[in-house]
Image (cartoon, rainbow, N blue to C red):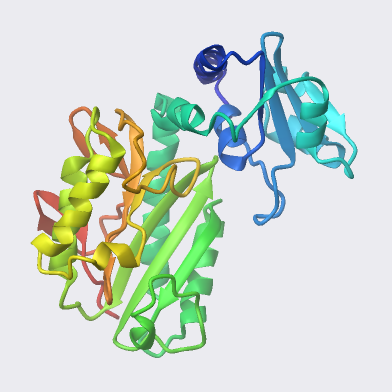
Amino acid sequence: MPSPADRRVKQQRLARVRSDAGAGALVLTSHEAVSWYLDGVRTHVSLAGPPVLAVRVDDDGDHLFVAANEADRLAEEELLPDDAARIVRVPWQTPPTDAATAVGPAMTEAVLAGPLRAARASLLPGERDRYRALGRQTAEAMTDAARTLTPGSTERTAASALAAALVARGIDPLVILVAGRSRLGHRHPLPTDAPLGDRAMLVVCGRRHGLIANATRWVGAAGPDDERILAVEADFLAATRPGAVLSDAFARGCAAYAAHGFDDEEWTRHHQGGPTGYAGRDPRATAQTLDPIVADQAFAWNPSAPGAKVEDTVLIGDDGIEVLTADPRWPTVTHAGRARPTALPFS
């Protein structure tokens, strides 16, 4: 259930955002902003569609503009009682965003993208607990699915096993990628009927309570660059600490490719990840992202090279890094003092 205490903190954070921007009202319209503010409610019907509600935040309190055919379900199953009392029912043919902005002047998310990212970056205790449970169960789903696979399994068979394991745990499968031996050169391998062969990559992004867990795993044979890609990841993680600037952490991780024997342009061939949470990457790190890194922020770096990749969702704390997407059943190696996943042999 949503937390009234957490909502008060989020209201205070948005009050500062609105004050700094000179905004009387602010309309939240994206999945990440609405789900964050409403403490993890499910904002979608179609995973590919826009949110079914928008939130207008102003000095008079919050008002939730909700598609009329979704209002009863949200009120009964997802929202706090105070939220349910502030629902404005919108005809199904009117986008909730249009209804929320038609009331009067208001700032939009597009104008305040940076301050809104900063407002949701440091996760509250309840969010961190939900994230730990999500990360653990996402990793367990990957283990359970991987254990059913053989070299003769197709990529689509692997994808269906991953999706089933996630959905059974109440996790929405936002992204599922699978590459067998013949397709390991692709960084975003949408599943095909190709067999896995002796080595395969599994990638998932799973969402629950608005939060997204990102992880990559390998099954079958070890790869020649497995250790080196862990060394690149270690440099990314070492630079990811409260008080640092995101672009600086990105630069250190990119430089690690050449330092560990990869082509010095390898980082240009795929994005490297960055902060995560209520968006898959919030934002995707580049040399131009100047967001500060804060305590209790989630990250998912994903350094990669042809046939090599590592990715987990972690929580950044003042006292170090906590890996959230971990399952003790998955084999690991110790690298830079941290347990990191290695390839799971086929049964």
Q: Residue at x 23, y 32 (%)?
A: 244
- Residue at 30%, 39% (x, y): give it: 246
Above or below — where is 261 with respect to 72?
below
Image vertical order of residue 64 relative to residue 290, above or below: above
Position of residue 51 in the picture relative to residue 115 (left or right): right
Residue 71, image x, y percentages: 81, 34
- Left or right of 164? Residue 213 is left
Relative side of 295 to 26, left or right: left
Relative vertical location of residue 100 with respect to residue 331 in this rendering, above or below: above
Which quadrant would residue 32 be assigned to in this image? top right
Quadrant in the picture for the N terminus: top right
Question: For this rendering, which residue is in front, 266 or 294?
Answer: 266
x and y, in percent, of residue 330 in the image: 26, 62
Q: Nearer the viewer, residue 210 or 329?
A: 210
Q: Residue shown at 34%/78% (left/top)?
A: 200
Most extreme residue toward the front is 288
In percent of width and height, residue 137 lies at: 42, 51
* Residue at image point 34% right, 36% down: 290
Locate residue 248, reporting x and y percent.
23, 41
- Report the number of numbered marks: 0
Where is residue 341, by image quadrant? bottom left
